[in-house]
Structure formats: structure tokens, C-alpha cells
Amino acid sequence: MSELKTAQRELIRLDNVGVSYPQRQGLFRSSEYWALQDISFNLVQGETIGVIGRNGVGKTTLLRLMANIISPDRGKITSEPGIRTVLLSLQAGFISSLTGRQNAVISGITLGLSRQQIESCMEKVVEFAEIGDFIDQPVATYSAGMRARLGFSVAMQVDPDVLLIDEAISVGDEVFRKKSAQVIRNRVKANETTVLVTHNAQLAGALCSRLIWIEEGRISMLGDAKTVIAAYLGAQA
């Protein structure tokens, strides 16, 4: 009974959440553009939720909300006090002029580790990221895949309560994609919580217990992965 209660512990809840941005119309006029509207769902401990949809429909904005990087203009977000939420995104920038090692240290500290903690696990970071001697080269010399692998590897050392992933595991070669997907599977088995934004419906179906399909800033469908994927792919045909 105690295991069931733990599995159903609610970590984050969104109620009728909306996010707007100013949009200029002409030289003197502006209007509001609602990137998200009336978003409602909850995230419970131990589940992996996938977020799918076309480019520009609000998926990344949703993750930024859940990571407390931005605040809603409407509605309410409630998080369990004290939970550590980490956003892993291809858009989460490293400092290009600094080396991979220097960026890994800064990123680790930003995510809540001490300098000693991130430096002590640097060997694991380099090994998982598969960048070898490039760890001491400026990040400006990295490909997008190398940046993503380094960011993913650092985030894995933090072991957050909620890991928010924005497309990062879809970048890189097939070997790394399989390895990063296995990390998510391990989180599922360990009753850890993940939200995954991806364009890869097959990956989402394999990793996620529930899917959220977003269309034009609204939830078009929320439910079990198989049902949502079938509807989403049918709409694209």
C-alpha cells in the first residue's frame, strides 16, 4: 500500500495555465500572442510523460514553465515544496569561449551541485558524453550533438526529482540515442520522474506512460501513449 501511495505522489500540477508574449503589429501597435492556453494536467512521481506536437506549438514554453524559468500569465502551477527540477535543453546555452570542462563545472553548479561534486564526477561526465579530449577544447568547436551529449551527461550527475528533457536525446548518433534512452528507462524502473519533449513518436511510445499532444498552444489530447500516438500520426497523414 505504501508503494502505491508513493507512486501516486503529485509533484507538479498545472491548472488552466496560459503564457502570452507581446507581438508587434506595425510601428506603434502591439498585441498579445498566447503561446499556451488553458493547459491543465498533473505529474506524479515515477511516471514519464511525453509531449509531442509540431514546431512552434508551445512545447518548450511548457517545459520552461515547469522548470520555474517563466511564470504563467493565467492559471496556476503548484509544485511540491523542495523538489529539484532540472531542464535539459539544446537551447540551454553553454559559454562558447569556455572549454567543455569549464562549462560542465558551471552547469553542474547551476543545477545545484557543489564545485567539488561536479569535479569529482568529471570522468563519468566525459565518458558518458563520448567527447574524449574535446572536453578541454572551447565549446565553440563542438557540434550540436556534442553539446547535447555534454549537457545530458552533466544533468545525469544531478539526479533531480523531475528531469525535463527538450529534444536532447534525439541528437547524436544511434549508439548515443540508445544509451540516453536507456537512461530514461532506468529512471522509469527506479520510480523517478521525467517529462520528455520529442518529435519522435516511436521513442515517445517506447518510453512514456502518458502523452500530451499540443496543437496551437492547447492540449489536443492527453492519454495513454498508444492512443495519443495513433491520433497524432493520423492527423499528420
Image (spheres, rainbow, N blue to C red):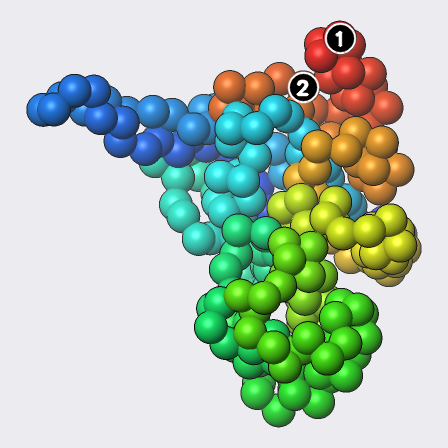
Residue holding disc 2: 221
Q: Percent position (x, y) of residue 51? A: 67, 34
Q: Are marks 2 and 1 in contact (CB under 8 Å)?
A: no
Name the mark on residue 237: 1
Residue 93, compared with residue 223, is above or below; it is below
Residue type, label 2: Met
- The quadrant holding residue 76 is top left
At x 49%, y 39%, the residue is 61
SS for tag 1? loop
Residue 227, compared with residue 155, is above or below; it is above
At x 48%, y 45%, the residue is 65
> Does residue 22 appear left or right of residue 80 in this picture?
left
Neighbor class of circle 2 (other Cα within 10 Å; few <14, some 14-19, many 20+) is some
Residue type, label 1: Ala
Q: Percent position (x, y) of residue 21? A: 32, 33
**CA gap, disc 2 and disc 1:** 17 Å
